[in-house]
Amino acid sequence: MSSVFIRKRSKNYIVYLEYLDKETNKKKQKNMGSYPLKRDASRRLNEVKEEIYKEELLLPNEMKMEEFILDFLEKYKVNLSITTYKVYLRICKKYIIPLLGDIKLSDIRPIHVQNYVDDLVGILTPQTIRIHLNILNLAFKRAYRLKLIKENVVQFIEVPKNKKFKNEIYNAEDMRILLEKCHKTSLELPIIIASGLGLRISEIMGLTWNNIDFNDFTITVEKITVRDEGKVILKEPKTESSVRTISAPKEIILMLKQLKKERLAAKLKGEKQHRELIFYDKNLEPIAPDVISKKFKYFLEVNNLKHIRFHDLRHSHVTMLIDAKVPLKVISERVGHSSVNTTLNIYSHALKEMDQEASDKISNVLFSGERKMG
């Protein structure tokens, strides 16, 4: 149990907090304020007693940021994907611990975190800095709940603004040329699935034959490929909304059916194959997304095609759906967005063009013929 008292030292009245140090199991005292007048010391004494009564008083804690952030991350990793956990751990070891690790958790102030952010501006992108702040925010939320700090200082931090990233996309003519150039190459099917279904690279590489319903013409996304300790593995998608079953164009299902027939014929001739995966490397192992990205980049260069990322095929797919007036809710569910708002934020440029088109159409309805203005 903590106690608080006043002791006179020289000409001042000092308010002391006596508490039990949990690490040493010994009683310690902390100076809570020194005052020339006894009435001021008494006022401070009552404030500290009130904080103790309301359980708002933070007992001195010697734990440093390095110890706390690593302990937090170890306990919180059950809520993270393998990839995200490793990214967070790398950020902690490379940036947070070297710059903030020696500060006592109880001494952390907004100025410490603001200086941390300011030091990274110009070195890292605003989006990456926000990931750093998200780690600190999660950690300080836990510290606050455990009454190790008085407040979550991240809420006071000014963060750099993200520069609006504009996706490069292929229009219908670009897509026609791309499909023509990739015909009968190893990239043909991944490209067609990305542009025809809007799947992410990791989702395409995670497809297995039991995900394809050849009767109902649907494809189920339930696994993705990620790198883990230098090895490529299959795992569940990061979000629940990413797990989905969507209708697929008949042409894509027929291409997959033909591939399965070819694989069976090759197997009967003794060729080794992966039992489940549709896409795999020469060692019958899953393929990492970055491998396909690099192959796609090289493919575009060799064929003198406009540069886009493989992921931009997904954006091209969504833009084509928007242009085709497919409802946003349907689009959002098909591409695995967590909400329609995500779709709205990412594809605002395409929706703005639709807004202008809507204005033109209502103009034709209201002001056509004799009512036409101008």
Image (spheres, rainbow, N blue to C red):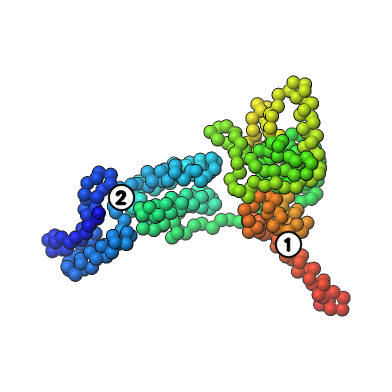
Relative side of 86 to 38, left or right: right
Q: Which mark is residue 353?
A: 1
Instruction: Point out the frontmost of discs 2 and 1.
Output: 2
Q: Could you tell me the amino acid type at mark 1? A: Glu
Disc with the residue nearer the chain's start (2 vs 1): 2
Farthest bottom residue in view? 370
Q: Residues within 10 Å of mark 2 (few under 14, many from 20)?
A: some
Q: Which mark is residue 287?
A: none
* x 81%, y 77%: residue: 373
Label 1 secondary element: helix
Label 2 and label 1: CA atoms lie apart by 57 Å
Residue 266 in view of the camera: yes
Residue identified by numbered label 2: 61
Q: Looking at the picture, how far across and down is residue 159, in whole percent?
A: 49, 57
Relative side of 83 to 204, left or right: left
How many circles with numbers are drawn on the protein? Answer: 2
* x 79%, y 29%: residue: 262
* x 19%, y 70%: residue: 39
Query: Which one is in front, 256 or 313?
Result: 256
Q: Is residue 159 above or below residue 229?
A: below
Q: Looking at the picture, how far across and down is residue 276, in whole percent?
A: 68, 32
Farthest right residue in view? 369
Q: Looking at the picture, how far across and down is residue 211, in whole percent?
A: 70, 39
Relative side of 75 to 185, left or right: left
Q: Could you tell me the amino acid type at mark 2? A: Asn
Label 2 secondary element: loop
Q: Looking at the picture, how far across and down is residue 30, in whole percent?
A: 23, 54
Q: Residues within 10 Å of mark 1 (few under 14, many from 20)?
A: few
Residue 182 in view of the camera: no
